[in-house]
Amino acid sequence: MDLIGTPHIPTSLIGALTLYPLLFGTLGRLPAVKRILPPKADTQKQYHLCNKIVASVHSTIMTCTGLYLLLTVDWTKNDLSTYTTAITPFLVGLELGYLTQDTAFEFYQRAAFGVGSNLILFHHVCVILGSVYYLYALTIDNPGPYFIGMLSLMNMSTPVLHFRWILQSRGRTFVNSKLKRFIDTLLLVTYFWCRIFGNWWMGVAIGAKMGMTWYEAPQHIGKKFTITTTTMFLMNVAWWLILAKQWTRSVNSFYFSKKSAKKLE
């Protein structure tokens, strides 16, 4: 049996494992990309920038394709979990391919520069395992297109996050500006909408379809969906709480600390 091109090993997985590293290498050689950061930026910063551009490209593809899937299917006529479409394995394969190369980046970054995030690494490994499990558990009768479409929208906040990093890397002018607070707020709202509200909404949609409440629905949709969505939801809540804490500190120090200082004067 030829597995290549089947839902178990979609061509998007092979494409992501090939094209994303190629894009990364190409970006590292472009003078225009190197000029995005300040001249004093070290090799690790430049390396990180290329990885963030690749991540933003991937996120844009995932978001647009996921939106297309969700908006072009009539969910009143087609079942949320059994409707068959080639887009579903495409999205899962693309995500798995990206996360695999990005995890390799994390390991390389630790070896080459001595820096890395244990939380990001744990997040990647969990999603990789979930994606692998999904692809090998995938059957023609139960591809779960609505779930995959909604999960792909979680990528919507990624370009905002990386754009903020680029601006912050350019110096304190941005760090001490109202623009930073605006982008921080945009990130906080976007992240909540696409990664927490969207995850909850999947339960609402499935519950409405099955005639039950949103918190009862996960018990009736199959373990391969419940485990993945529940794990993602809990991890996204943890990430959002970290963002919310940073946002609160940033807004408080920028707006209210300055007012207090002026009153003391």
Image (tube, rainbow, N blue to C red):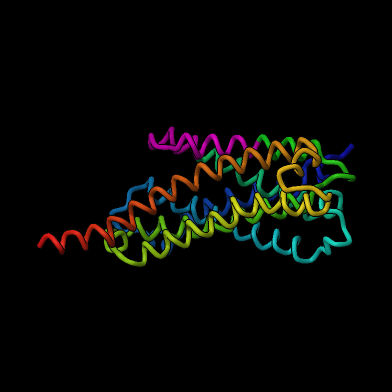
**Image: magenta residue range:** 106-128
- Image quadrant in which you'd find residue 177: bottom left
Q: Is residue 73 at least partly visible in the picture?
A: yes
Q: Is residue 51 magenta?
A: no
Left/right placement of residue 173 relative to residue 19 reads left
Residue 121, horizontal then vertical, whole percent: 52, 36
Q: At x 40% / y 48%, what residue is drawn?
A: 245
Mostly what secondary structure, the magenta segment?
A: helix
In the rendered image, the vertical position of residue 97 relative to residue 39, given as above or below: above
Q: Nearer the viewer, residue 174 or 202?
A: 202
Q: Farthest residue in the left direction?
A: 265
Q: At x 66% / y 43%, what residue is drawn?
A: 96
Left/right placement of residue 192 relative to residue 140 reads left
Q: At x 61% / y 47%, what residue is drawn?
A: 98
Residue 155, horizontal then vertical, whole percent: 59, 54
Q: Nearer the viewer, residue 188 or 89?
A: 188
Quarter of the image with the N terminus is top right
In the rendered image, the vertical position of residue 46 relative to residue 176, given as above or below: above
- Image quadrant in which you'd find residue 233: top right
Residue 104, horizontal then vertical, whole percent: 55, 38
Residue 223, horizontal then vertical, whole percent: 77, 35
